[in-house]
Image: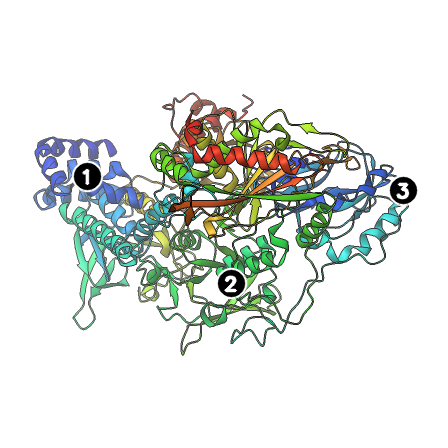
Amino acid sequence: MAGLLNIGTTFIPSSSNLLRNPNSLPSLRTNNPSNKTLIQAKIREIFMPALSSTMTEGKIVSWVKSEGDKLSKGESVVVVESDKADMDVETFYDGYLAAIMVEEGGVAAVGSAIALLAETEDEISEARSKANSSSPSAVVAETKMEKPQETVASIPPPPSPVKVSVPIAVSASSIHPASEGGKRIVASPYAKKLAKDLKVDLGSVVGSGPMGRIVAKDVEAAAAAAAAVVVSGAAPESPKPVAQSAPAKVSGSPGIELGSVVPFTTMQGAVSRNMVESLNVPTFRVGYTITTDALDALYKKIKSKGVTMTALLAKATALALAKHPVVNSSCRDGNSFTYNSSINIAVAVAIDGGLITPVLQDADKVDIYTLSRKWKELVDKARAKQLQPHEYNTGTFTLSNLGMFGVDRFDAILPPGTVSYSTSNSELLTLQRSLQGAIMAVGASQPSVVATKDGRIGMKSQMQVNVTADHRVIYGADLASFLQTLAKIIEDPKDLTL
Amino acid sequence: MQASISLSMASPAIIRSDCAVEFFSINASKPLNLRFCGLRREALGSTALKQLDSSRVVSSRRKQSKKLSASLSSNGSPSKGFDYDLVIIGAGVGGHGAALHAVEKGLKTAIIEGDVVGGTCVNRGCVPSKALLAVSGRMRELQSEHHLKALGLQSHNSQEPLGYFKVSAAGYDRQGVADHANNLASKIRNNLTNSMKAIGVDILTGVGTILGPQKVKYGKVGFSDNVITAKDIIIATGSIPFVPKGIEVDGKTVITSDHALKLEFVPDWIAIVGSGYIGLEFSDVYTALGSEVTFVEALDQLMPGFDPEIGKLAQRVLINPRKIDYHTGVFASKITPAKDGKPVTIELIDAKTKEPKDTLEVDAALIATGRAPFTKGLGLENINVATQRGFVPVDERMQVLDTDGNLVRHLYCIGDANGKMMLAHAASAQGISVVEKVCGKDHVLNHLSIPAACFTHPEISMVGLTEPQAREKSEKEGFEISVAKTSFKANTKALAENEGEGIAKLIYRPDNGEILGVHIFGLHAADLIHEASNAIALGTRIQDIKFAVHAHPTLSEVLDELFKSAKVSL
């Protein structure tokens, strides 16, 4: 296929591509508002472009230009091998190829820098010193992401950027008879692949396979353990709900060496920053217990028609939101209400160790059968990593359900906002405030003994919901009446099938 | 001369047309084996019609052959006094193809087999491996829930889509799969045996040894040898798996394709040494059955025999997304089978510097480093012939050359034993070519028209030159070459099957429209290649074949598009 596609890409992959991959989290690099002022960059980074919708990393096939070469706009600079094809990547700027950071044959994650482009010849040396200062991370894509954004020539590199020192972890390696006391790591081919995908250091994984070999499930367990250590699975890159955690496989956590201090990975750092950022939003929570017997009965009745519980909950929520537009609003600038024109219910789905929020658009208007089909389609796409940006970042209200794990109540963090790039210019940065002002955590529905007003005691299925909202726009009474409406709809669900 | 042959053949054919029906009813499944081994189907058809009961027509045939050889023997060696016109040593696909064609041409033919009829292809190669690959193909379909869903098919154990999802796992019964492969091999073997018996080929059991010119002995160990004479002799003894030095094959954990096809166990992790056709096909089988695979390849790239572009794409589809990793540019210098609770250990050294590089510990190792000719004990020294790395030296007409480079009269070697092109159907084609020659019709087989296929999912096939080979040739001979490509993504049938991954590539001369090579990677590539190989064999040019009509919508339109996209400057 090489050569068939000759798409000149921009240096900066589109934000949609960046956001699609929950693992690469490239948006976080520029999550620093101070960068907004750095438009006068003279040294630009050349990024690994996203050449296909499924590409997460690319291999440098060859550099067409060498360091020091003058480039003019539109010229091919590098040939990149993606998961699908080899493609020439062109420059969108005039300048000099100052420093190559990922050599031929090297692999870099989409959105990570692979070279520096200087605007004038004088800046080449400056760029090179910069490249050298980050060279240890140049080959390994994920560590490179740690490098603080420094597109400005005039600002010296931060004193000591926290780099992920890849733990060599000799002592913690597998107890494999032939691994020569941990010097060699014996891992199966799939375990190695998974480790690369999930960014797990094999040196810290204890193998449970034949003769202590590391097999796929060891890597998965290590990744799950790592994810559990991070603040409950916060998805930092977009309007995704934050309180979803990967199902807790925490116990045992074989990859953790007790008594040690382990620096954050890129993703963990990003999560951390985003969580701190979320403190800027004054949130509060209101909980409600809803009886689900009628809903369960309805579900049983129309399940055969392909209706899912997720769609029913989304539909009920949307109908309640329609009566309480303020709960569907958000505060983007600290000075105003933004009433969203449509009701788009995002539903958090844990997937492949990550998390994504497929959005059911106009959930109040679409009928339950269509909504159910749409949901199935979205989930399939999500699993195939084929969701388009508008299918996961346009939610105006998020549902997060941990009921299937037996969780009866929990509390979600309202994601502070979403960062997006302009697609053609690396310096442009907009911090788009979240579209949503509230997120609802749904617990398991379980049989409870209930005393009713007429003095009787009975058994009813009940579930607890807990809404986290931005108090700048949504007040306690708003949430309370919203929840009351929601409870009414769920307890008398005839409207859901209209 | 030829006219007289065809005339004399034609009349008995008409007389015996009633027997032809009977023949086919006995061997109803017969055409199957032909397809598997790539034999010429028309050879059988005409054979069946013309030469049904060899004992009945022996006299007439003998007459013919005498007439033939008399007229041929300008050098004055009569065929009178020989036991057979043609004796073939080795009843593999090559020998079988030669025998069928020889009978068709009226030669009294015997075939000597020391093991089982069918040779490597039928018993330990192409045939049983196709059975395993058929299983692996279906496993892949069933395991690809996404692919099934894209077709609208539902799997039964999908969960409520909130939270985690499980892929429904298709299961298999190892013994059942192994039995399928074994049953297929015996069925094809019986078909092959019957097809030769039915037309009167004498199947002689024992190891054949050449005693001298036109003289062969055969016999089982412990029994007295029989000596027979033949006007012409064809060596078709085939090959055995090649095992490099330092590798200890125990048949359990360190195995060759011979053992692997029995599928006695499916290891969790298997190293495959060699990433050619055999290694690649087995990686397809093992990964579909749940194994993880590590390739060990001596050259710098995986799949070194393929056109580089095809190889690269194939790697992205057949290797990278599967549970496979690889070491390239390394030799497996020492492989020790698993014993005493220790795994199979593989010591890797750098292919160039010979420095130790790594040690692998795996559950099993499959040695797929190619095949070595099986030519020991043939008695070649009796006729002053020395093998080269085990191969019998031959000229372009498969005539054996002696140590002085002179032709050994009446002795031919076909198939893996001569090493020209180690493919079952190539051996058969060479056999047919030799029979043509001994019947007085000089024939040189164009090896560039012989297709090759690798039956992975999807398949890879090729005929003629690779792009680098074509470029080298064009520079040497001073002509231009061009390359045309089409994608399966543009083919309606492929998209209907949801199998749009694939490419067809044509290397040709723009000045005269000659097809130099065609390479296909995609759904049913192995079946698609024949339009191109036939065009090369018949000398059809692009400007002519591009007007041939293809049914729509079919995969064959991939080649239609390919020929149409070529730009011939005529």
Q: Position of residue B498 (x, y in %)?
A: 43, 34
Q: What type is the residue that disc 1 sits on?
A: Thr
* Distance in Å between CA atoms under marks 2 and 1: 62 Å
State the image quarter where residue A77 is shown: top right
Q: Chain of mark 3?
A: A
Q: Quadrant of the N terminus of chain B?
A: top left
Vertical placement of A114 versus B353: above or below? above
In the rendered image, residue B428, in percent from the top left (x then y), is placed at 31, 46
Identified at 80% across, 41% down, the residue is A33
In which quadrant of the rendered view does residue A468 lie? top right
Q: Position of residue A410 (x, y in %)?
A: 56, 50
Disc 2/disc 3 C-alpha distance (Å): 50 Å
Q: Which mark is residue B47?
A: 1
- State which mark lies toward you, 2 or 3: 2
Q: Amino acid at mark 2?
A: Asp
Residue at x 50% of width, y 27% of height: B513
Label disc, if present, on residue A218 of the rendered structure:
2
Label disc, if present, on residue A121 of the rendered structure = 3
Q: Position of residue B314 (x, y in %)?
A: 50, 45
